[in-house]
Amino acid sequence: LACRRQKGLGAGVVDVRLWKHFQSTKLQSLTPTSRAGHRLLAGMTKLKQLLSQLPEGSVTVETVGPNDTDVTLEANRQLLVEVCSKDVQALTNLIQETFKAANVEPSQLYSVEV
């Protein structure tokens, strides 16, 4: 048995990565602490959930655009791979370290509890 964790990894990181992507490419005026910034983060959570089920998804986030307009944001899994590549590598490293610490080969694994 082995247990490992890394504080900076988790599902919330995906939301933040998507937030940063759309903020930097489409909604530059948003700040993380603004109400519109919080609405965008909630939209990114919905988008992440859609992309966990479908290859493409879109969400409409209310009053985050210029003059408080609604904005529809689209993404696909490839974008998710691109914006989360560092996190995927960190998770891969964490899994490899856990196997090493447990002195277990992946082929010996029956189940994983997350």
Image (cartoon, grey):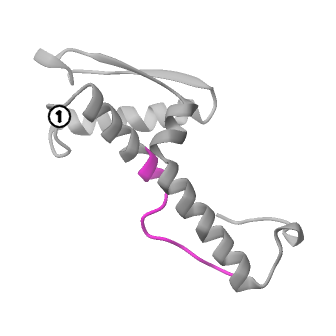
Is 22 placed above or below 82 here?
above
Q: Give the quarter of the image for residue 102.
A: bottom right
Which quadrant is the N terminus positioned in?
bottom right
Which quadrant is the C terminus positioned in?
bottom right
| Residue at the image position 46 percent from the left and 20 percent from the top | 58
Q: Position of residue 35 (x, y in %)?
A: 17, 36
Task: Name the kind of residue labelled 1 in the image.
Answer: Leu
Q: Is residue 114 left or right of residue 111?
A: left
Is 49 placed above or below 57 here?
below
- Judging by the rendered image, the residue that carries numbered circle 1 is 30
Q: Position of residue 10 (x, y in %)?
A: 49, 57
Q: Give the quarter of the image for residue 112.
A: bottom right
| Residue at the image position 48 percent from the left and 47 percent from the top | 84
Q: Secondary structure at mark 1?
A: loop
Magenta-drawn stretch contains 4? yes
Q: Is residue 52 left or right of residue 34?
A: right
Answer few, some or many: residues within 10 Å of disc 1's Cα (few below 14, many 20 plus, some between 14 and 19).
some
Please state the extent of the stretch shown in magenta in the rendering: 1-14
